[in-house]
Image (cartoon, helix red, strand yellow):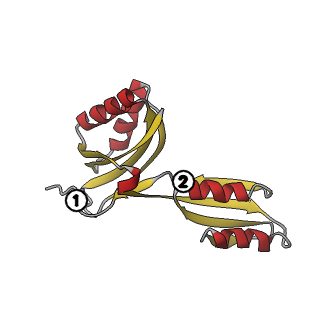
């Protein structure tokens, strides 16, 4: 099993994300992460999907998704030719005497404290999946009350792979 990251450009219409995820569901394919948002051109939505399978399954996923009516472009975002990022918000329980150690870990990972309450902190951290996983590992001694992760977003490096739609 291997992972692949696909970037789709789709018409920005209602139900487009439902049709994409429905295809995965009908075919029994797994979505590990999916993010979507409008592009610089409001007519289109950029969807980033992380999925896994063997070579044959991943090839079928790409072909089946490309056949969907709303899909204007699909490409694989290869790790060495792309930039991936994820955002996580982490709510950590902490007493006042624990705050310095949590703040120190957050600073090392270039995170931000975005909310402080008497019994907890909310931390914002962005970066690659591995960075966020390592950050969460270092918080292991502290109680994570809530965690929200956006899923991966990505773009290919340079201008060679930019898709221009009419």
Considering the numbered disc 1 on the image, is that residue within a helix, a strand or a loop?
loop
Does 18 sit left or right of 95 as displayed? left
**The quadrant where residue 161 appears:** bottom left
Foreground disc of the pair 2, 1 = 1
Does 134 sit left or right of 164 as displayed? right
**Distance of label 2 from label 1 (alpha carbons):** 25 Å
Residue 114 visible in the displayed image: no
Residue at image coords 47%, 52%: 152
Dot 2 or dot 1, earlier in sequence? 2
Q: Position of residue 32 (x, y in %)?
A: 50, 40
Residue at image coords 40%, 25%: 26
Residue farthest left in this picture: 166
Whether label 2 touches label 1, CB < 8 Å? no
Residue farthest top in this picture: 27
Please tell me how crowded label 1 is: few (under 14), some (14-19), or many (20+) other residues with Cα within 10 Å. few
Which residue is disc 1 drawn over?
Answer: 160
Residue farthest front in this picture: 80
Residue 131 visible in the displayed image: yes
Q: Position of residue 148 (x, y in %)?
A: 60, 54
**The quadrant where residue 141 appears:** bottom right
Q: Nearer the viewer, residue 91 or 55?
A: 55
Please tell me how crowded label 2 is: few (under 14), some (14-19), or many (20+) other residues with Cα within 10 Å. some
Q: Is residue 72 above or below residue 124?
A: above
Residue at image coords 70%, 54%: 137
Q: Position of residue 97 (x, y in %)?
A: 86, 72
Q: Is residue 102 above or below residue 19?
A: below
Dot label at residue 30: none
Dot label at residue 129: 2
Q: Quadrant of the C terminus?
A: bottom left
Q: Is residue 88 above or below residue 23?
A: below
Residue at image coords 48%, 32%: 1
Considering the numbered disc 2 on the image, is that residue within a helix, a strand or a loop?
helix
């Amino acid at each position: 099993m291997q992972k692949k990251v696909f970037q789709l450009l789709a018409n920005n219409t209602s139900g487009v994300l439902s049709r994409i995820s429905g295809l995965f569901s009908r075919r029994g394919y797994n979505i590990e992460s999916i993010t979507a948002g409008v592009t610089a051109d409001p007519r289109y939505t950029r969807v980033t999907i992380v999925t896994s399978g063997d070579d044959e399954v991943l090839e079928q996923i790409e072909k089946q998704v490309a056949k969907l009516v709303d899909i204007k472009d699909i490409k694989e975002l290869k790790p060495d030719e792309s930039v991936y990022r994820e955002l996580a918000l982490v709510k950590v329980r902490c007493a006042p005497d624990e705050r310095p150690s949590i703040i120190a870990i957050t600073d090392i990972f270039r995170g931000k404290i975005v909310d402080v309450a008497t019994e907890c902190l909310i931390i914002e951290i962005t970066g690659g999946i591995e960075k966020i996983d390592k950050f969460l590992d270092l918080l292991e001694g502290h109680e994570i009350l809530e965690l929200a992760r956006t899923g991966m977003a990505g773009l290919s490096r340079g201008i060679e792979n930019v898709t221009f739609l009419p």
